[in-house]
């Protein structure tokens, strides 16, 4: 569904009127388009002098054609200044060396001039060390403080920009390229103020133009909306897709599968024989499993019927668990596989009239956290993506005033697109994302709910 207000404030008259009245003026977000050569289309500024900045400096030429440092000659780069430098498209700051409270001023010293030189839709990544990995309580406190800084900066950056914090474990420095390719590019357009942890992993992407080449991916709820977008992005990145949805959606499912060169599987994931049917459709197994199928049946808890409660729990929570367990028991998920669960910010923050939905999506996050240690023994990772307000047929049915509130209650003052969720899923599905496990990434434009 189109956002008429977004279109209006990006017209010449609308921009002037919004400015004169002090109304929000969201910027149209840049999103990844086929044929793009580099993740960063513009100047990148690298700051900090720790080991993580050094590791990042080694991949800059793969990210952008134009790199600068905050100090002349650091990493062999020219110094960027607000007075003479070009507009900045990306910022990377290594804060891992900050171990004392007095050193936190370096955050202000780096970002204050840089914020004055930002271009449109800038991307910011702050690098640190996980607080729980540090023995010194002061150093751990300093690193934990980075979360408050990045979340605040995400609300200040505007211009359609975003800010992320990556805690990089020792030995995981070689995983930075994959993370920076995602977070510094338009693929992360609607992701902001996220905190993720990279750990050592052996697998790497061989071809960044087709990072999923040779992989087979199963996507549930794939006939339309977010599921269809996930299938399209996985196929774009080289995966062979197996698309699953309910029998009534068979025609749309088969049409999409034909277009993507994939396979359509029509079955009810809650049926008693669903596991057997699914295993029969996967003779060679899969490398990627995306549990996207989900429903809503909204009522306040005082008016919630057994049928509304049970149907949401069965589809959103029980079915992913049952089907995944069946695939694992039958050896249908290959070693070094990737499982991605679609959660929701409702499962993090709760939502009025959605107690059943919030329970199911919080439970989905619980599945990722509970399964991760066991699956890791086979190199399989399991992570969750939690969308916020995404422009779909489901959100189009929301009453106008509530829909507008959902769109504006985030740092970007707009709803996301199905592609935004799909890009996050595709990143979690990559071989290099073996560095991430049992983690939850919100795709919500830094929603004010549960922030």
Image (cartoon, grey):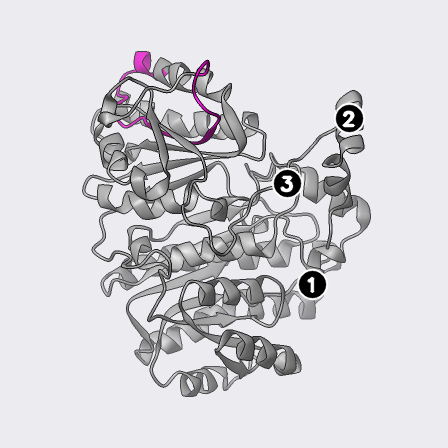
Q: Residue at image x 76%, y 54%?
A: 398
Q: x%, y% of residue 446?
A: 56, 38
Q: Viewer-nearest of labels 2 and 1?
A: 2
Pick whichever of labels 3 and 1 is earlier in the sequence. Answer: 3
Give the camera-side residue of 283 and 3. Answer: 3
> Is residue 209 visible in this depiction of the protein?
yes
Residue ID for mark 3: 28
Q: What is the crowding at mark 1: few (fewer than 14 residues within 10 Å), some, or many (at least 20)?
A: some
Residue ID for mark 2: 16
How much space separates mark 2 and mark 1, taking CA atoms?
A: 41 Å
Q: x%, y% of residue 425?
A: 46, 57
How much space separates mark 2 and mark 3, taking CA atoms?
A: 16 Å
Secondary structure state at the residue bearing disc 1 = loop
Q: Residue at image x 52%, y 51%?
A: 386
Q: What span is colored magenta in the figure?
A: 82-104
Residue ID for mark 1: 297
Q: Quadrant of the C terminus?
A: top right
């Amino acid at each position: 569904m189109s956002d008429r207000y977004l279109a209006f404030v990006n017209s010449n008259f609308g921009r002037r009127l919004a400015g004169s009245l002090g109304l929000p003026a969201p910027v149209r977000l840049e999103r990844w388009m086929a044929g793009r050569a580099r993740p960063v289309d513009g100047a990148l500024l690298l700051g900090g002098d720790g080991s993580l900045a050094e590791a990042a400096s080694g991949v800059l030429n793969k990210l952008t054609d134009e790199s600068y440092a905050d100090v002349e000659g650091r990493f062999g780069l020219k110094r960027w200044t607000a007075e003479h430098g070009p507009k900045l498209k990306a910022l990377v700051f290594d804060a891992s060396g900050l171990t004392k409270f007095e050193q936190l001023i370096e955050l202000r010293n780096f970002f204050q001039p840089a914020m004055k030189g930002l271009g449109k839709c800038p991307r910011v990544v702050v690098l640190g060390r996980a607080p729980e990995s540090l023995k010194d309580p002061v150093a751990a406190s300093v690193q934990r403080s980075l979360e408050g800084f990045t979340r605040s900066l995400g609300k200040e950056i505007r211009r359609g920009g975003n800010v992320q914090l990556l805690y990089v474990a020792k030995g995981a420095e070689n995983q930075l390229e994959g993370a920076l390719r995602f977070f510094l590019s338009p693929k992360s357009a609607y992701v902001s103020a996220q905190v993720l942890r990279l750990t050592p992993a052996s697998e790497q992407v061989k071809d960044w133009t087709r990072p999923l080449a040779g992989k087979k991916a199963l996507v549930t709820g794939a006939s339309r909306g977010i599921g269809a977008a996930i299938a399209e992005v996985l196929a774009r990145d080289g995966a062979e897709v197996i698309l699953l949805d309910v029998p009534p959606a068979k025609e749309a499912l088969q049409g999409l599968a034909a277009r993507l060169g994939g396979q359509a599987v029509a079955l009810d994931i809650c049926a008693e024989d669903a596991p057997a049917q699914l295993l029969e459709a996967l003779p060679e197994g899969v490398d990627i499993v995306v549990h996207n199928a989900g429903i809503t049946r909204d009522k306040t808890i005082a008016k919630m019927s057994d049928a509304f409660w049970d149907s949401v729990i069965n589809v959103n929570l029980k079915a992913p668990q049952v089907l995944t367990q069946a695939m694992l028991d039958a050896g249908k998920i290959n070693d070094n596989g990737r499982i991605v669960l679609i959660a929701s910010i409702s499962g993090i923050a709760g939502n009025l009239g959605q107690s059943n939905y919030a329970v199911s999506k919080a439970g989905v996050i619980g599945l990722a956290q509970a399964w991760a240690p066991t699956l890791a023994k086979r190199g399989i990772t399991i992570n969750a993506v939690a969308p916020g307000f995404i422009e779909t047929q489901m959100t189009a049915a929301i009453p106008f005033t509530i829909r507008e509130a959902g769109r504006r209650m985030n740092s970007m003052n707009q709803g996301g697109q199905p592609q935004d969720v799909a890009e996050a899923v595709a990143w979690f599905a990559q071989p290099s994302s073996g560095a991430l496990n049992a983690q939850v990434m919100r795709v919500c434009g830094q929603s004010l709910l549960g922030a």
